[in-house]
Amino acid sequence: MLERLLRPDPLRVTVVLFEVTARCNNRCVYCYNVWKCDGGISPADLPTAEALDLLRRVLAERGRYRPRQISFTGGEPLLRDDLETLVSAVTGAGLATNLITNGRRLDADRARSLVAAGCRLFEIPLLAPSADEHDALAGAAGAFEGAVRAIGAAKKAGAHVVAAFVAMRRNIGRAEDVARLALALGADGLMFLRFNPGGVAHATAAELLPDPPQLVAALRVLREQRRCGGLPVSVSVPIPPCVVDPAETEGLGVGFCGAGSDRTYLALSPRGEVRPCNHSPTVLGDLRRTTLRRMLRSRPYRAFCAALPVECRDCPHRTTCRSGCRAASEACFADVARLEPLAAAHGRFPWR
């Protein structure tokens, strides 16, 4: 007991993803927004004053419960005309910000005003190297043109731009071409986001999930283009080692679930509800009524962090992989302790 009490708690909040609106001008086939699960009703936007109050509550947290960065996301955050006001409130308090946007409303003027407000990092999707392919996956005509224009506008305004490639069965073979296009457009990096089921997309997960040979082939071409002077690549959605050998991601930035660790990140909904991450439907509490500190010390959050599928208990990678994406297990199986969808479909468990 004494050893447990003296052991330092590793939890440290690094990022809060503020979903400032549920509205969106795309209809992406891979959308994971939790309010779209099972025909759910999208929450309305908070007025500017109430959204600012939520940010003040986040900024009022102390020590390891105060994040280092606020990411503005949605829906499509640029549908809010007051986004610069929200960004300024965060950067004025000394925190970093970034914007996750489909880019369709990011013209030169808006890019300049956001950079002036303190936003220095933009994440913009590139789903394919052509308009027909990208627009089909984004569910909107003009989505590709908007993303390409947005990358140029953000770079011209002096921002750092990361292109986001969501790797699905339908487009994963285009990873190399997308990486080349992103480099030509002036992007500073590429995020490789293997499709992660949730939201409306959990119903079509089997059609969208890439298989191990597809993942390996894509990772190999990205590693090779990086070796030859291409963009830095980060693998930002967990790829469990039981699905793809970790050697295939050598030289790439690889991320695994940070829940409960010194890389904890949280989602803040358009109505002030806090969740363990942007993929998770679990509501830990309402920030208007309680604090991050209390929510992160609660039994529901500790249960979320501790969940481990039986297949993972003897895995030599369990402390790194942490069972892949437990939020996807919640979204697809309503059980955080079940094996996540990609591992359930393609995992190999020789240690069992």
Image: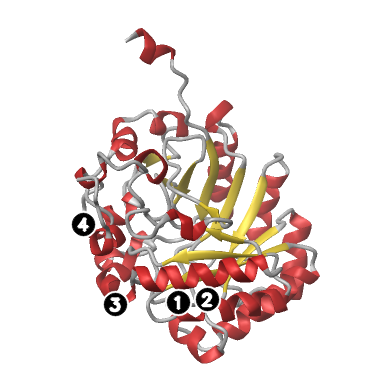
- Check if mark 1's residue and mark 4's residue have beta carbons within 8 Å: no
Residue kind at label 4, given as amino acid type = Phe
Label located before the other in sequence (2 or 3): 2
Residue kind at label 1, given as amino acid type = Ile
Q: Which of 97 and 351 is in front in this view?
A: 351
- Residue at x 43% of width, y 12% of height: 6
Q: How crowded is mark 4: few (under 14 residues within 10 Å), some or many (20 or more)?
A: some
| Alpha carbon separation for disc pair 1 and 2 | 6 Å
Query: Which of pointers 1 and 3 indicates the residue nearer the eye?
Result: 1
Residue 349 % position (x, y): 24, 52
| Alpha carbon separation for disc pair 1 and 3 | 13 Å
- Check if mark 1's residue and mark 2's residue have beta carbons within 8 Å: yes
The correct choice, above or below, for 180 with respect to 52 in the image is below
Toward which corner of the image does residue 56 lie, by quadrant? top right
Residue kind at label 3, given as amino acid type = Glu
- Residue at x 70% of width, y 56% of height: 119
- Check if mark 3's residue and mark 4's residue have beta carbons within 8 Å: no
Residue most toward the top?
A: 2
Label located before the other in sequence (4 or 2): 2
Label located before the other in sequence (3 or 4): 3
Image side of residue 28 versus residue 332, left or right: right
Give the structural element (helix, strand or loop) at label 1. helix
- Check if mark 1's residue and mark 3's residue have beta carbons within 8 Å: no
Image side of residue 331 versus residue 142, left or right: left
Q: In this figure, which residue is indicated by the disc labeled 4?
A: 333
Q: In this figure, which residue is indicated by the disc labeled 2?
A: 175
Residue 124 shows which numbered tag?
A: none
The correct choice, above or below, for 29 with respect to 276 in the image is below
Residue 207 shows which numbered tag?
A: 3
Q: In this figure, which residue is indicated by the disc labeled 1?
A: 172
